[in-house]
Amino acid sequence: MRSAIAAVAPAPRVWSVGVCGGVPADVLIEVENGLSGSRLHGGRDAGVKLRMRSVGTADQDELLRHGEIAFGIVRLPVPTPHLVRAVVWDEPLGLVMAREHPLASRVEPTWSELSRQRLLWYDEGCAPGFADTVPAHLARLGWNSVLHPVDRDEHALFLHALQTTADLVALRPRRAVEREPNLVWRPLPTSRPPRERLAVTAVSGSRGARSLHKVSGERGWTFFAE
């Protein structure tokens, strides 16, 4: 019933956007500028506003299908059919550690050195799909990482864990942490690092999907029908 009501309701003046944890501010600004700054549907949705809310990736599918959020922001891949996707962020992952970490002085740590480190990582609830594919990529490169999972990707908990655990490192794009004075970023020892891709999603065939397709063309976002 919620889905049917959402499908026939008038175009909203406020779009609700579910945001997974750890999304950089630059991404939120790009999405805000794209979705609220464009004249969508021939001008009928001009000047719409976005309301960002924290929603875990695993919970976004149901809210999207029921029309309770118009868009989601997630890490790819997501094991969810019937969604269109527009990639707004595609960056290589590198190592992140506290400034006091023993490997912080290394320009590029080796796989041997990394084998003695644990990886602060997402659990399935935070980032289904992404949580599995990146460790598998690292294993192919030579690092069978021991995972130290977190069930919520909050920046304060992320910082605390890295600063209080001696053998713990994380993976983030450089741009996501370069303004953080207590952390150090180092490249992985490979020319083929795993990447973090953040995408805006909407239900295929919905008003939001049509809007997202139009905005993607205007902003140069890579759009995937499903």
Image (cartoon, rainbow, N blue to C red):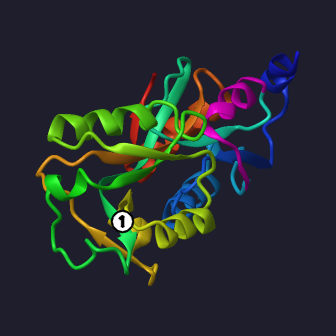
Q: In front: 45, or 104? A: 104
Q: In front: 35, or 144? A: 144
Task: Indicate left or right for 22 with 99 as reference.
Answer: right
Task: Indicate left or right for 69 with 177 as reference.
Answer: right
**Residue 52 at x, y percent in the picture:** 71, 54
Residue found farthest to the bottom: 181
**Residue 212 at x, y percent in the picture:** 55, 39
Q: Relative to 166, is 144 above or below?
A: above
Residue 60 included in the magenta stretch of the image: yes
Q: Which picture quadrant has residue 58?
A: top right
**Residue 186 at x, y percent in the picture:** 25, 68
Q: Relative to 10, is 219 above or below?
A: below
Q: Which picture quadrant has residue 197?
A: top left
Q: In front: 93, or 145? A: 145
Q: In front: 158, or 90? A: 158
Tag 1 secondary structure: strand
Task: Indicate left or right for 39 with 94 as reference.
Answer: right
Q: Label 1 belongs to which residue?
A: 96
Task: Indicate left or right for 11 with 41 as reference.
Answer: right
Q: Which region of the structure is painted magenta?
A: 51-66
Quarter of the rendering occupied by the N terminus? top right
The number of numbered badges drawn on the structure is 1
Q: Which picture quadrant has residue 95?
A: bottom left
